[in-house]
Amino acid sequence: RGAARQAQPELVEAYARAEHLPGREQAKLRREEARREFQRHWSDTGSSEVQVASLTERIAHLNAHKARHPKDHHNQRGLHRALAQRRKLLRYLRRRDFARYADVLTRLGLKDNYA
């Protein structure tokens, strides 16, 4: 009874997984993962590709929230702002470098509606 309990690594690992985190933290981890996937170099956080990937994750999170809370109009405003920002970034990317634009669309599974 007086002996200290031994840590059970498999239990610690099971409870420390991302699915046990709050929703906001899960969304944050998904955005960070998208940033890492689209980075052009190790410290890249502001390139158009990274911003579009981050916004796409945020839009998915806001859409899920909208499905659960249809009367949350503040969320809807945030969703519209995020969509407009992503649209602007994709237009810019399409104008500047079409190959990178096409790559981002295919990797994110988006349609080419940003002419």
Image: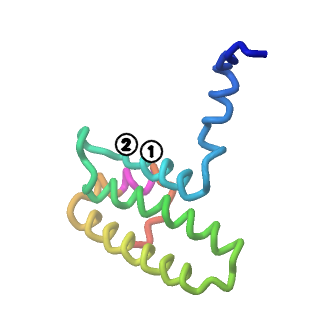
Q: Residue 29 placed where, x, y %? A: 49, 48
Residue depicted at 28% across the width and 59% down the height: 48
Q: Are marks 1 and 2 in contact (CB under 8 Å)?
A: yes
Q: Residue 67 placed where, x, y %? A: 69, 72
Measure the C-alpha gap from mark 1 to mark 2: 5 Å
The majority secondary structure of the magenta stretch comes to helix
Residue depicted at 27% across the width and 63% down the height: 93
The numbered mark at residue 36 is: 2
| Residue found at the very far left of the displayed protein | 96
Residue depicted at 39% across the width and 42% down the height: 37
Left or right? Give the position of 3 relative to 77: right
The numbered mark at residue 12 is: none
- What amino acid does circle 1 point to? Glu
| First to last magenta residue range | 102-106
Quadrant occupied by the C terminus: bottom left
Callout 2 secondary element: helix
Question: Is residue 105 located in the magenta-colored stretch of the structure?
Answer: yes
* Residue placed most toward the observer, 67 or 7: 7
* Residue placed most toward the observer, 26 or 63: 26
Question: Crowdedness of circle 1 by 10 Å Cα count: few (<14), some, many (20+)?
Answer: some
Quadrant occupied by the N terminus: top right
Residue depicted at 60% across the width and 70% down the height: 63
Q: Residue 69 placed where, x, y %? A: 69, 77
